[in-house]
Amino acid sequence: VKPKFMEFIQSLSFPLRPESGLIFESIYKKWIIHTNGEGRNQDPLIKNLHLEEFLMYPLWLNSKPWGIIIADNYVTKKTISAEDTKFFAMFMEQARGAIENSQSFENTLTKSHTDPLTSLWNYGYFQYRLDEEMAKAESLKNNLSVMMIDIDDFKRFNDTQGHIQGDTALKYISRILSGNCRKEDILCRYGGEEFSLILPENDKEMASFLGERMRQSVEIKDILNYRFTISIGIATYPQDGKEKISLLKKADSALYEAKNQGKNRVIIAS
């Protein structure tokens, strides 16, 4: 449940122009403003939040303005002293540094888990997230499906058209697959011409429907004057396995069966 105050704050909008008053001034001065609102009754920030005496700190991260921190004396009503302002400035500088470090770490982590060619998640991230999602599914008593996807006869295309064209085709196909996923689905490049997809809260029927949609989306698309097809194997937790290894084996076996049956099809583990 969102607090009413949070809903109110999120409903506010201030253009980054001089008519936004203190907000504009704070961001572009890049330093703390201490005001009691005197002579600024019409300032949009003061009017909307009914502020009296308060401090404003512009939050700049990596040379970009991200927001503003506002601290007032709403509870105590005590005058904000020079010492208070100094302490607030020190605190916010430390907070800003911590946020920048956190972002830097997150960016490094994301890069280490991203496939450089397709920009999808990589094999290591797939393994990590599958552990996480299976634990979540067990805890919530939900279904979870895993899809293994392989581009049919991709080696033949690579051998005849060359690896540069092959890489371009992989990028195109990864975008088609990604375009069919929900926000919560986790699409990864498993390796070579193989992809993997984690489908939280998906049973066999839902996963099969998505797999068929993906198969058709690839089949009808002309990519580099070539028509690719994909084969898909699907396994679902907990019916096909309660352990990661057994679930992946079932999905792999289903993919192998799709290849054996003539490729360009979706097979569900039995």
Image (cartoon, rainbow, N blue to C red):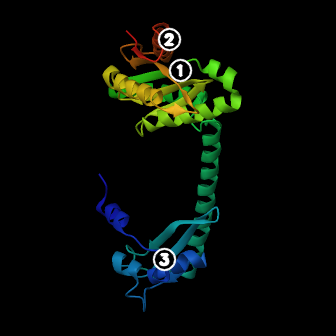
Where does the image place residue 264, in percent across and percent down from the top left?
A: 46, 18
Tell me which residue sits at (39%, 80%) in the image.
44
Measure the alpha-carbon separation of dots 1 and 2: 9 Å
Whether 121 is drawn above or below 53: the answer is above
Secondary element under disc 2, as helix, strand or loop, is helix
Is 25 left or right of 146, judged from the image as shown? right
Where does the image place residue 239, in percent across and percent down from the top left?
A: 35, 14
Q: Type of residue at label 3?
A: Ile
Res 150 label: 1
Where residue 119 sits, quadrant-wise, is top right
Whether 169 is drawn above or below 10: the answer is above
Q: In this view of the protein, can residue 157 be seen by the observer? A: yes
Figure quadrant of the C terminus: top left
Q: Do tag 1 and tag 2 residues touch (Cβ < 8 Å)?
A: yes
Residue at image mark 3:
23
Where does the image place residue 145, in percent across and percent down from the top left?
A: 40, 23
Q: Do tag 2 and tag 3 residues touch (Cβ < 8 Å)?
A: no
Residue at image mark 2:
259
